[in-house]
Image (cartoon, rainbow, N blue to C red):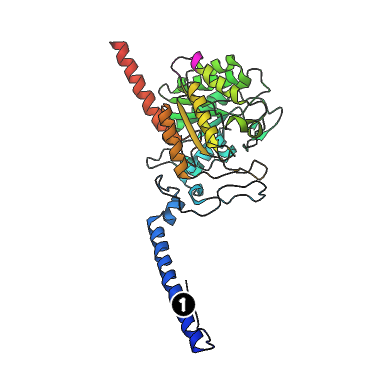
Amino acid sequence: MAWRGGYMCLSSKVNKTLAQSCVGVVRQSSTVLKEKKKKIADGPSLQDFISGEVNKDTSWSEYTGKLKREKGDTARLRLPPWLKREIPLGESYSKLKADLRGLNLHTVCEEARCPNIGECWGGNDDNVSTATIMLMGDTCTRGCRFCSVKTARRPPPLDPNEPVNTATAITKWGLNYVVLTSVDRDDISDGGSSHFAETVRELKRQNSSILVECLVPDFGGNQTSVATIAGSGLDVFAHNIETVESLTPRVRDPRARYRQSLSVLEHAKVAENGLLTKSSIMLGLGETDQEVMQTLKDLRSAGVDCVTLGQYMQPTKRHLRVAEYITPEKYQHWEKVGQDLGFLYTASGPLVRSSYRAGELFLKNHLNNRKQHQEQDSKE
């Protein structure tokens, strides 16, 4: 606090009282200032925010910004500091974008406006870039209220060259773990499952050692379509439950139902014994802790092995508003809950998304170790 100028005293008594008050205020202000300086020194630096590398263990308990929208609020919540990300830049980012455009491929990173695009496309310390390829075009037949992918009743026809182009691009990048996802294609009899499966098979033909995770639609609950994907040679079958049961009708397209999603995940296990399954939950849409807990239990009962929890972020003004920004400490709580429930892996954090690099690394190591054990058992 800065003090400027002086005070005009009307009497010596008033002057004395005022001076005593000022001394008390100055001492109190000095103590407050020291406390604030200590908090700033102990907290994350500006560089942490610029680099997007705020430590997971950083405590935000002192943050005083508004995190929850009350009933009747019309204003959007301000983005809290732990959700700030760097601007996507760098040679790897530009090269990956050029490769994708050259092969007429799309990514969910761009279409869904993922906040991690700079980190994933820019590469890490080993200069390895990752991207989640979106198959079957960039136009979806559904209109979920949280998703910014464009929609149409009859999108353009499938590109017959897409399976080969996708496999060629991924082989060119030298990736050893790739995530494939897609838009919903309710206009196609099998939901595009055979096209999706052919892409996986082509990838395995070009590079048999590559690990493939498929984040798939629900195919309208069609078990044949689910089995087509499950038996394509993929390594991880992923389908997102997205939100808790009570919010599903408001958040997702009416054709995407909570119990239907659980059934898809359950049937993938039946169709392909030993297949790893994965799902994801968005937080901050107005769900309660009890509902999140029930959703986790439902996923575990459906045999889901891996789960991710992340913050919902409103992609445009036309989409659902954020009801609440969940603190990093709360995400750590859900990570512990996931471990206690028996999930093989739980990734929980404000910027965690379905395709999460740390999770991919864990699954890659797990799958490789399992493969080695299976080879040893077959030799014995």
The amino acid pointed to by label 1 is Cys
Residue in the picture at 39% in, 28% down: 364
Instruction: Count numbered badges in the picture.
Output: 1
**What residue would you read off at disc 1?**
22
Q: Quadrant of the C terminus?
A: top left
- Which picture quadrant has residue 142? top right
Q: Position of residue 272 (x, y in %)?
A: 48, 15
Pick the residue in front: 6 or 348: 6
Tell me if mark 1 has few (under 14), some (14-19) or many (20+) residues whose alpha carbon lies within 10 angstroms of its own: few
**188 to the left or right of 14:** right
Q: Position of residue 269 (x, y in %)?
A: 49, 17
Q: Is residue 174 visible?
A: no
Report the span colored magenta: 269-275
Q: Position of residue 342 (x, y in %)?
A: 41, 26
Residue in the picture at 53% in, 31% down: 133
- State the SS at label 1: helix
